[in-house]
């Protein structure tokens, strides 16, 4: 069913790197979500009125909020697909995140409203009625939501959309809430004990938690996220695959929407190669990154000593000594200024974000002590910096 819908409504559906194709995926997800949630709202509202259940009606209006969310998602995806212009040279991709944030506030509002209604139902409970047809409608809605969650999860993974993944998680949350409301009705039927208000309270909390989760997932790319280990590996391996590149470090990625990212990286090149030759390689990598990775990449060249075995040996010693202090540490931009009585070692150390300022100062002292134990002439000029890759 999913593949049929994709083939029917998404042209060139296999070209997921294309912004237009990605927009079509988003439109398909939104339209399917609107249709399913409007039907579920109508069915559950009728059931809720028939059995006089606040938890069922809370669940119904949760589906209506999901439909509204899909409408906002539709508008957001269409606007996010607009090309770059003079006022927005990096495109409009972040509108998708803003739309998802609006969805989160709608979900929170619905959850809070029914939180208040459920408290009122606990204070003034009303008798419930059991109806087999109503229960079958609720069971059918569970099946629809399970499929809708699976649908959005598949599409979200296919185009790497955090918004669709959040929608999928919200759908599975709806499954839990609907099952809870069915449980309250069945409980009343068999025990004559009304727990509808308490279940409605639980449903409202689940809805609000889903809203918080969506808000969190959409705020992170807006605020700025670290590079994932997978993306870090993909980009560094791509850069280092070119002849003339010895290594890389200091990768930074800026996200301007799901289909547009800008990145910068330091590429290590041999210091005995003509600068124009290295520059030509760097230019080629930057051009290829746009074509092959869809990434606007800016590369800074770092010349590296490759023929001086003495420098390479000292670097290896220092690197091993730093690793002894903390295996998570790494060094780069190593240079050595040799002298008869003093040897200056200049390098950067990447430290985890968990290090406090006090720990950083102590680390610098520990590195100096370690280096001095290797050779009393070693004087270190150490720059501590945090990495931009998510820590595993």
Image (cartoon, grey):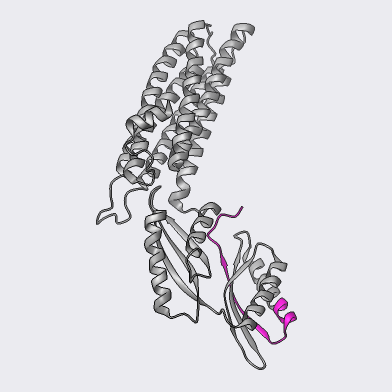
At 42% from the left and 19% from the top, the residue drawn is: 40
At 38% from the left and 72% from the top, the residue drawn is: 280
Relative horizontal placement of residue 75, taking residue 193 as reference (left or right): left
Q: Is residue 84 above or below residue 126?
A: below
Q: Nearer the viewer, residue 226 or 45?
A: 226
Q: Nearer the viewer, residue 72 or 328?
A: 328
The residue lying furthest to the front in this view is 243
On the image, the x and y values in percent for residue 18 come to 35, 46
Relative horizontal placement of residue 330, taking residue 21 as reference (left or right): right
291 part of magenta stretch: no
Q: Which residues are magenta?
A: 369-392
Number of marks drawn: 0
Locate the N terminus by quadrant.
top left
The residue lying furthest to the bottom in this view is 340
- Quick check: can you spot residue 226? no
Q: Nearer the viewer, residue 276 or 225?
A: 276
On the image, the x and y values in percent for residue 386 come to 56, 64
On the image, the x and y values in percent for residue 123 come to 55, 18
On the image, the x and y values in percent for residue 24 come to 33, 37
At 28% from the left and 46% from the top, the residue drawn is: 82
The residue lying furthest to the left in this view is 86
- Quick check: can you spot residue 170? yes
Relative horizontal placement of residue 290, taking residue 234 as reference (left or right): left
At 29% from the left and 56% from the top, the residue drawn is: 89
Q: Is residue 238 above or below residue 141?
A: below
384 part of magenta stretch: yes
Q: Is residue 190 above or below residue 266?
A: above
């Amino acid at each position: 069913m999913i593949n049929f819908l994709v083939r029917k409504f998404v042209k060139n559906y296999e070209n997921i790197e294309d912004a237009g194709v990605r927009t079509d995926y988003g439109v398909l997800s939104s339209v399917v979500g609107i249709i399913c949630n409007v039907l579920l709202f109508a069915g559950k509202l009728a059931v809720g009125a028939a059995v006089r259940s606040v938890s069922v009606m809370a669940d119904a209006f949760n589906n209506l909020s999901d439909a509204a969310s899909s409408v906002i998602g539709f508008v957001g995806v269409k606007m996010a697909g607009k090309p770059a212009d003079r006022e927005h040279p990096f495109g409009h991709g972040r509108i998708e995140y803003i739309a998802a944030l609006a969805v989160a506030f709608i979900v929170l509002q619905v959850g809070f409203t029914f939180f208040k209604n459920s408290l009122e139902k606990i204070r003034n409970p009303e008798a419930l009625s059991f109806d087999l047809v109503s229960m079958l409608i609720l069971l059918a809605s569970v099946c629809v939501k399970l499929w809708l969650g699976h649908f959005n999860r598949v599409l979200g993974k296919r185009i790497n959309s955090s918004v669709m993944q959040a929608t999928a998680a919200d759908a599975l949350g709806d499954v839990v809430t609907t099952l809870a409301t069915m449980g309250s009705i069945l409980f009343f039927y068999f025990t004559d004990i009304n727990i509808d208000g308490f279940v409605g309270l639980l449903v409202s909390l689940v809805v609000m938690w889903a809203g918080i989760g969506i808000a969190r997932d959409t705020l992170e790319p807006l605020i700025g996220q670290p590079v994932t280990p997978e993306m870090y590996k993909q980009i560094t391996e791509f850069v280092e695959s070119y002849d003339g590149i010895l290594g890389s470090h200091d990768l930074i990625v800026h996200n301007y929407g799901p289909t547009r990212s800008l990145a910068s990286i330091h590429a290590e090149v041999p210091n005995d190669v003509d600068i124009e030759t290295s520059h030509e390689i760097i230019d080629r990598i930057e051009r290829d990154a746009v074509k092959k990775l869809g990434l606007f990449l800016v590369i800074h060249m770092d010349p590296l000593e490759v023929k001086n075995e003495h420098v390479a040996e000292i670097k290896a010693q220092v690197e091993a000594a730093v690793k002894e202090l903390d295996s998570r540490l790494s060094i780069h931009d190593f240079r050595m200024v040799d002298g008869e009585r003093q040897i200056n070692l200049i390098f950067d150390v990447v430290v985890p974000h968990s290090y406090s300022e006090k720990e950083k100062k102590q680390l610098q002292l520990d590195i100096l002590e370690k280096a001095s134990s290797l050779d009393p002439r070693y004087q270190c000029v150490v720059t501590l910096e945090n990495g931009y890759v998510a820590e595993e």
